Amino acid sequence: MDRRHHILVCTFFIWVLLLTGCATEHRFVKKVAFKDKNKVVMTFAGPVDETWAKDVANYSVYEKQDPDILLKITDIALSPDKRTVTLTFEDALNQDQAHILTVTEMMSAGRSQGTAILTVKKLYFGYLFSILIGAMIINNFVFTKYLGLCVFFGTSQKKTTAVGMGITFTIVIVFASMMSWFLYQFVLKPYHLDFLQVVVFIGLVSLSVQAVDTILRKVNPALFKAFGVYLVLVIANCIIIAVPLILADNEYNAWESLMLSLGAGTGFLIALFLMSSVREKLELANVPPTFRGLPIAFVVAGLFALAFLGFSGMSIF
Amino acid sequence: MDPALVKLALGGLTVLGVIGLFFGIGLALAAHKFAVEINPKIEEVKETLAGAQ
């Protein structure tokens, strides 16, 4: 009985995520995508009228960042079944940028289907993956943004504690940032209270830490004992407040938020693991007395940061 | 004062109050449901020990 209850709650949340994460932009447009270097392909749910489709004035395309620079369309091709329109542009498109495509008064069988404002992006899974890897390695929060250093130096003395802290942190950050994303998008923004985001996010972080603490203590005492003091230390980590703020700033949707928080968590885990491996070796090294302890740890962290700089500017997909 | 600002402030207070109350009650319920009995004798024994270490 109890287990069935849990499964029900889980499926409910997965549905909510799916519904909010995959909302289509217009019911009549099924798909928009880039093709070749200078083409955009649109697929409609029904056949469209040829006179409407061939009129250049019905389309306007610009890069999301520069709404005043409209891109010039040189050719419009309609497929024989009249469901697919291919726009050809004068210049090659910068496909790393999202493009906004406005289609006015779509005419299908003599009836207007309304105006659609569509976003053209590259393959979505690739985009999600690049967010994950970006947060994990390329823009690692510890080594390139210098966040969460207090906990990073405090718990990286031994490998076991480092890994324990990393795993706890990943679980809590995913939980907390999904909650703050939800609250920001559906409560704070509609009520114009976005200026209170920092206060609300801090409250949510401490709430999720407290909730994980209470539940874990009962459900899995062994794991709780293994986590020990680190669970409470998670509150003192700056990454956990930085991620919800980044999500709110960039207007990410549910999947993108999940990927960013997961990437930030695993990135912290990687950083802790690397650092603890070096510090275990440092215990045996002959370090000058002035550098013993934290100073040499900071030097090592600096070297790691230099190494991670090698990833900067990389892009996947 | 601008009535729109007063409205925003009151709305904000209500919304945040409701959120706080909701999560507070949630946490209290969770603490109740997942309560762990701690043997009171542990504390007693600890009290009677010297406790230097």
Image (cartoon, rainbow, N blue to C red):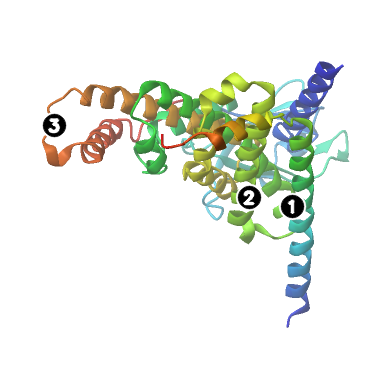
Could you say whether the residue bearing mark 1 is in a helix, strand or loop?
helix
Q: Chain ID for label 1? A: B
Relative to A194, is A6 on the left or the right?
A: right
Query: Residue A208: where, in percent of width, then height?
Result: 64, 39
The dot on residue A203 is: 2
Query: In what quadrant of the picture does the N terminus of chain A appear?
Result: top right
Real-space CA distance between mark 2 and mark 1, rounded to the nearest whole angstrom: 9 Å
> Is disc 2 surrounded by few (<14), some (14 to 19) or many (20+) residues within 10 Å?
some
Kindly identify the amino acid type of the residue bearing the numbered disc 2.
Gly
Real-space CA distance between mark 3 and mark 2, rounded to the nearest whole angstrom: 42 Å
A285 up-or-down from A88: above or below: above
Residue A102 seen in the current view: yes
**Which badge, 3 or 2, is on the more N-terminal residue?**
2
Query: Residue B5: where, in percent of width, then height?
Result: 73, 74
Q: Nearer the viewer, residue A95 or A157?
A: A157
Q: Chain ID for label 2? A: A
Quadrant location of residue A49?
top right
Kindly identify the amino acid type of the residue bearing the numbered disc 3.
Val
Residue at horizontal 56 percent and vertical 50 percent from the top? A249
Could you say whether the residue bearing mark 3 is in a helix, strand or loop?
loop
Query: Residue A87: where, in percent of width, then height?
Result: 61, 33
Q: Nearer the viewer, residue B15 or A152?
A: A152
List the residue tagged with mark 1: B20
